[in-house]
Amino acid sequence: MATFLYRVGRLAFRRRWYLALVWAAVLAAVGLGALKAPGAADEGFSMPGIESQKAFDLMEERFPGATADGATARVVFVAPDGGKVTAADHKKAVEDTVGGLADGSQVASAVNPFQAKAVSKDGTTAYATVTYKVAADDLTDASKEQLEHALQEARDSGLTVDAGGSAMADGGGAGGAAELIGVAIAAVVLLVTFGSLAAAGLPLLTALIGVGVSMATILALSHALGLSTTTGTLAMMLGLAVGIDYALFVVSRYREERARGRAAQEATALAVGTAGSAVVFAGLTVVIALAGLAVVGIPMLTKMGLAAAGAVVVAVLIALTLVPAFLGFWPNAVLRRKDRGPGRTEEEVKDNGGTRWARFVLRRPLPVLILGVVGLGALALPMTSLQLGMPGDEAKPTSTTERRAYDALAEGFGPGFNGPLTVVVDAKGDDDAKAAAAAISKDIGATKGIVSVSPARFNEAGDTAVFSVVPSTAPTDEKTKDLVTAIRGERPGIEAETGATYEVTGTTALNIDISEKVQSALVPYLIVVVGLAIVLLLVVFRSLLVPLKAALGFLLSVLASLGAVVVVFQEGHGAGLLGVETTGPIMSLMPIFLVGIVFGLAMDYEVFLLSRMREAYVHGETAHQAVTSGFRHSARVVVAAALIMIAVFAGFIGESDSMIKMIGFGLASAVLLDAFVVRMAIVPAVLALLGDRAWWLPTWLDRILPRVDVEGEALTRGADSPEPAPTDRETARV
């Protein structure tokens, strides 16, 4: 591996113009393809194999066109204190507002609350449902402005008016300012790390080129592969993250080789041969983690994972080809001014912060290990009370109209009104479908925790009925989950009695089913991803204990970060400091996202640190000396990479959406704990206690494992008498 990549780096340096033109042509080609490709419609969220999805599919089959994905808005009217919406003046204002909303060119219907009996028992609250002909993403600015204008006119009449529903979605999300802040902080960290504008700018430039190629490719293929508009989100985030990391590692090794007095071409080839090997295997671990998302069984998540894995592959290729090509264009620009003279010896740069920290840990391995494990274990404890769910409008800030509409409906109609259950009765083959549906409706309505049951609505064939069930508790309440379980538990008896079957769906039931499926998929996902990574690290480091230690350290950090998320977003401790106004269940996909993304980044840091330790050990240093050498060469790079990732992820905590806050906080805390507690403290402590045993491998296993030479032993054997290398003046020539 090292020898092959050495040749790749040398070729990229010598043929830099060709490589630069090839990457420019690739970027132009995929960019043109993205511009000409038809836009991909959002395919929506689906999860095969769960009851609520089966019920939804049955509704689409039996009620063709009834489940169209047109946008909706639920406009809530609340009378002033002491008043009622049924009063003449208030009633007129409500009816005028609904009439004005119905005139919109994209509006399919606007239901008058007084005709639909959508008025609370105390007469203080009413709501009108507005249905549009198009999906939320296709609403024009004129339609949105008409809705806002109608709401304001109703407010001017003295009513409190707010609205929720998909029509109110602004289409925003993570990105924009948060990404710019992250890139700016990354630039500052790189500048401090390298002390050179060119060295700081090169990783940023190549990472942005890689992200450009990846995103343009995703856009170009989105229609052909059925990719949704959200597929590229994870690819952009991780492509930028690992693109900076991988280029950073290669440039850092190049500067190190130049400091030893090597010519630019030889230093580039050695950097790609050694650091490039670590980049390849670090990239493979990330790809494994992302491709493993297919285990969860959510098509959208699978596509997001594969798209992000493709972005990581592009980042690896950029680091192995374009980075050395750019080093060929500017061989001295990435060096500090004081390093552009005669090369220093390795002894002159032996001590730095990394070596001092490594010696500190090596002198006190047991206390450091105990403190690290106990600290992470204490942080992980709250994870035992983890509750998964899909927060909705109730999790938004009270400054939003969606949250105020949610609260008004809960107060006027009860907390369960915001999350009704939909029951689909399949009476096909039953002699009396209406009697069967009525019996099922009566039995479900008698279940404890049900407030009301709507009249059944039949399809044209008369063999399928649908009715709504309003629980007494909120959508994210654990009692609502128990209620859904109870209704489904009554099914065998009711089916035996009526001869018809039924299924429970609706947003609330769908979210409950998703949470349960994700929770059940988490352990298999961990086994697949961690198992494959252990095998990969076994091949790379030729050690049994190092891969096991890496996996256990990752589990510690990810459990601790999940515990921190529970403490803040579920239990509410310190939530106000982050601007979180409402606590509740943790987003269902959060554990999967956290495991997949953080595992990849954690293994990056593991490979970067351990590859230098393994290199030193193979070249004759003792186990303790190898730890010090690894930290001398890699600690600064790992710290810089971790700080960049923390800054990028922490930028999302400033977003208004609570779910984006949660993702940003979870990822930032996970990287912080994994990089600085696990990799920088627990790893050297364990290696110090194990000594030479850390690198032990059974003889029989050593014989059958392929040798990839990630430590560059083959390169070092010839390093004392390398082939004559061109001078810097010659290699800088275009």
Image (cartoon, rainbow, N blue to C red):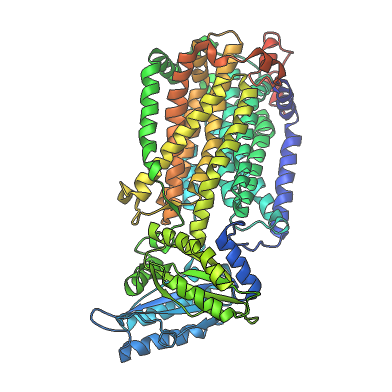
- Closer to the camera, 349 or 142? 142
The answer to whether 184 appears left or right of 404 in the picture is right
Horizontal and vertical percent position of residue 556: 45, 32
Residue 394 visible at all? yes
Can you say whether 184 is above or below 428 in the image? above
Horizontal and vertical percent position of residue 194: 51, 28
Residue in view at x 49 percent, y 61 percent: 489
Horizontal and vertical percent position of residue 159: 32, 80
Residue 330 visible at all? no
Q: Farthest bottom residue?
A: 88
Q: Farthest left residue?
A: 82
Can you say whether 436 is above or below 684 in the image? below
For the N terminus, give its image quadrant.
top right
For the C terminus, give its image quadrant.
top right
Residue in view at x 38 percent, y 59 percent: 479
- Closer to the camera, 71 or 717? 71
Can you say whether 26 is above or below 326 in the image? below
- Closer to the camera, 489 or 237? 489
Can you say whether 275 is above or below 300 in the image? above
Residue in view at x 60 percent, y 63 percent: 54
Horizontal and vertical percent position of residue 291: 63, 42
The answer to whether 341 appears left or right of 316 in the picture is left
The answer to whether 644 appears left or right of 565 in the picture is right
The answer to whether 569 appears left or right of 438 in the picture is left
How many numbered circles are shown?
0
